[in-house]
Amino acid sequence: MRETLAALIKLQEIDAKLRTLELSKGDLPQKINALEAELLELEATVKDRQQRIATAQAEMRALNAEVDTLREKLKRYQSQLYQVKTNKEYDAITLELETTESAINQHEYNVLELEDQEKALQTELAELIPQLEEQRNVLSENRRQLDEMLAKTHEQEHELFSRRHEITSGLSRPIFSTYERIRHGRSGVAVAFLKDGACNQCSSRIPPQRGLEIRMMNRLFLCEVCGRIMLWDPERE
Ligand SMILES: [Zn+2]
């Protein structure tokens, strides 16, 4: 029995290491997910600004072409004005002239507005592009760290699992299933140690007579409060 209990101490140590390895991975994948989401959002913003710039530029080109056409028209009306014969004709051409001039003014005003819009968008884009680069760098650095860590932990995990298997194959089935049941129910810690007359996991007092029995390491005792396997290790006392 003493050997079995000593094996449980080793098993607990291995499980604690495996748990630490699992926890060390825990944070980075989540961090990478968050960074990826931020990057997608940033990329969408950049794409949106680029599209809005392209749209503004296309609208400006269309308006400028329209203004050119209207100016041609304006020239024709102006030369027609010198050839009119009647007041009625004069009034009609004057009206066309005024309408065309006002359309040109309106278009030119719209072009100015679009120029302002484009300028603001270009300024925004100039700030977004370096942010995007930075975000991509941070993400790839985190991915590299995760890969490195996974490669390292994979090796350690492999070694720990083979040591674990060596120990568990030497344990009786009831002892092993007791250990596993407590480990799953007690956040990964199935073994508690007697320390200064108490359970080192839940701090409940252990009666002196029971303490003596636990020290003998001849039988499996469970802590009456936390239910963990009570063991004694002189180095931990
Ligand atoms: Zn306890």
Image (cartoon, rainbow, N blue to C red):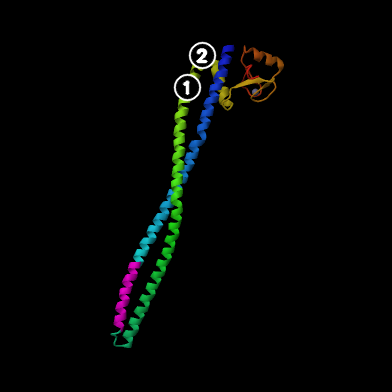
Amino acid type, callout 1: Glu
Q: Position of residue 11 (x, y in %)?
A: 54, 19
Task: Examine the rendered structure and indicate whether residue 219 appears above or below residue 75.
Answer: above
Task: Identify the residue at horizontal 35%, vertical 82% (top origin).
Answer: 94
Residue closest to the eye, 231 or 49: 49
Task: Identify the residue at horizontal 44%, vertical 44% (top origin).
Answer: 136
The residue carrying mark 2 is 170
**Dominant SS in magenta:** helix
Task: Reply yes or no: does residue 66 show up in magenta.
Answer: yes
Could you say whether the residue bearing mark 2 is in a helix, strand or loop?
A: loop
Task: Examine the rendered structure and indicate whether residue 125 appears above or below residue 143.
Answer: below
Task: Examine the rendered structure and indicate whether residue 98 appears above or below residue 181.
Answer: below
The residue carrying mark 1 is 159
Which stretch appears magenta?
A: 64-81
Residue 192 located left or right of residue 74: right
Quarter of the figure with residue 104: bottom left
Does residue 39 show up?
A: no
Task: Identify the residue at horizontal 68%, vertical 21% (top origin).
Answer: 198
Choose mark 1 or mark 2, whichever is in front.
Answer: 1
Amino acid type, callout 2: Gly
Q: Position of residue 155 (x, y in %)?
A: 45, 25
Task: Reply yes or no: does residue 216 show up in magenta.
Answer: no
Quarter of the figure with residue 126: bottom left
Q: Position of residue 50 (x, y in %)?
A: 40, 55
Residue sticking out furthest to the bottom: 86
Could you say whether the residue bearing mark 1 is in a helix, strand or loop?
A: helix
